[in-house]
Amino acid sequence: MATATQPATDLRRRLEQVVGTDHVRVDAGTLLTYSTDATPLERARPDAVVFPASTAEVAGVLAVASELGVPVVPRGSGTNLSAGTVPVRGGIVLVLTRMNRLLEISPDDLVAVCQPGLRTIELAQAAAAEGLLFPPDPGSHTTASIGGNVAECSGGLRALKYGVTRDYVLGVEAVLATGEVIRSGGRLVKDVAGYDLRRLLCGSEGTLAVMTELTLRLLPAPEASGTGMAYFGDLGDAARAVSRVLRSGVLPVTLEFLDRVCIDAVEGYAQIGLDRSAGALLIFGQDGDPGSIERDMARMAEACEAEGATQVRIAESESEAADVLAARRAVLPALSRLEPLTILEDATVPRSRIAEMVQRIQEIAGRHGLTVGTFGHAGDGNLHPTVVLDPADEAAIGRTHEAFDEIFAIAIEMGGSITGEHGVGLVKLRHLERQLGAEQLALLRRIKRAFDPQGILNPGKLGS
Ligand SMILES: Cc1cc2nc3c(=O)[nH]c(=O)nc-3n(C[C@H](O)[C@H](O)[C@H](O)COP(=O)(O)OP(=O)(O)OC[C@H]3O[C@@H](n4cnc5c(N)ncnc54)[C@H](O)[C@@H]3O)c2cc1C
């Protein structure tokens, strides 16, 4: 006679046949660990966590899941900030970190071929060793995986000049929900045979297929780089400086900003000599040949001064430049120290409207009695308003959600987006229709059904 635990035992046994007993985990500790990702407040328990080592094993797991109708949530390093890997319908969390091999770097074809579990920084370092550059550099690059970067279409500090992850994906090998393996694209720069499925998989958030191998475009590494910083009395001046920089004929590699709350938090955390009295800080940078860097850095400094910068500094050494960039990378850990709970969001507006957007964010936060620090990729119009609060204060959590609802509504009204780089995941699904419209959302769902008719891949997320 079948018992209540029979289906779970069957699932485990079938998965063990595919990946071996050591690579299927159902113990309470593991299930708890894989209930969450880097997104606060969201959690749901999976039934099993599976660690495949090859495309064939991924295909085997998906064939079993498909046959038994069990959800599968692909997962890289779990650093996403939209609850993209929280298994809201239970099932299998498919962790791809064992598939972490760099298969090839080809200086002749300017490509890298790797498995999805390779960490971003490892790819960047291997490329650099060959005099090449892999430009996408999300703040999480030491931990995040390439598969996660592609599935989220991650951005980073260099997106203004170099674009985002999708701009570097030439080819994808992926396993469909049924276990069939497809390859889309390859190592060619030009290839227009058929619909561009590899592009569709960029930003698909684990809902269309599991990517098992990636062929990525590399660039010749720039000879050198320059970094500078400019303080402003208020954010309006900083925003005008952004526009002036972009009109000056310079396309900076980096153009980041921190508001007053972020400057104060970073200085309190890292003590790197930031001016706590400033209203805003712009960090700007360029790479290329030394002559053009000198010219571009001077132009950017002039643009900041012309818009009323109270202080402009160009780093004179690599270590000084590293300190400036470290200030930007320290914002999130610094804000996290202010209160135990940090809710970071990711709205994007046309860059000409950054100052207006930050003012609206401050006004909304003030009205809801919340502390918000805003920082982000000024050159991309991509803002990260971040609320810090006490997790025991349920009323404040409720007000935070209301505040973000208003912030997303304003971003859409301004012609912006509810997410520039962190993905829709679970947390922004309810805002998607407002941005895409009912017709486009319906098309998105039909695409999902074409890839995954049973709806087993990351259910409850995009396409649901
Ligand atoms: C401190 C910090 C800084 C960050 N900075 C940035 C930043 O600057 N820019 C930015 O864009 N993001 C940033 N992020 C967000 C996050 O790091 C990125 O989204 C990252 O690309 C996720 O990679 P991951 O390996 O952790 O993926 P995961 O979190 O494991 O997964 C993310 C999504 O990808 C899917 N997925 C993962 N692997 C595969 C695969 N092989 N096939 C199909 N689907 C897959 C998952 O189902 C999920 O939907 C930051 C996060 C943190 C915590």
Image (tube, rainbow, N blue to C red):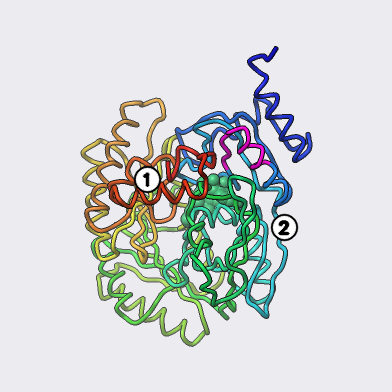
Tag 1: amino acid? Thr
Q: Nearer the viewer, residue 35 or 404?
A: 35
Mark drawn on residue 386: 1
Verify whether residue 68 appears in magenta: yes
Residue at 67% across / 57% down in the picture? 115
Which x, y percent locates residue 427? Answer: 40, 40
Which x, y percent locates residue 81? Answer: 47, 45
Q: Taking 285 as reference, is 354 left or right?
A: left
What is the tally of numbered marks visible in this picture?
2
Q: Which residue is mark 2?
A: 101
- Would you say residue 143 is visible in this rendering? no
Verify whether residue 13 appears in magenta: no
Q: Nearer the viewer, residue 317 or 178?
A: 178
Which x, y percent locates residue 185? Answer: 58, 67
- Would you say residue 217 is visible in this rendering? yes
Dominant secondary structure (helix, strand or loop) of the stretch shown in magenta: helix
Residue at 37% across / 45% down in the picture? 386
Residue at 69% across / 74% down in the picture? 106
Counting residues from the start of the chain, the first of labels 2 and 1 encountered is: 2
How many residues crowd mark 1 within 10 Å: few (<14), some (14–19), many (20+)?
many
Q: Nearer the viewer, residue 31 or 389?
A: 31
Instruction: Tell me the SS state at disc 2.
Output: loop
Query: Would you place residue 327 above or below residue 111 in this image?
Result: above
Q: Which quadrant is home to the C terminus?
A: top left
Magenta range: 61-73
Q: Nearer the viewer, residue 12 or 401?
A: 12
Instruction: Tell me the SS state at disc 1.
Output: strand
Q: CA distance from mark 2 to mark 1?
A: 35 Å
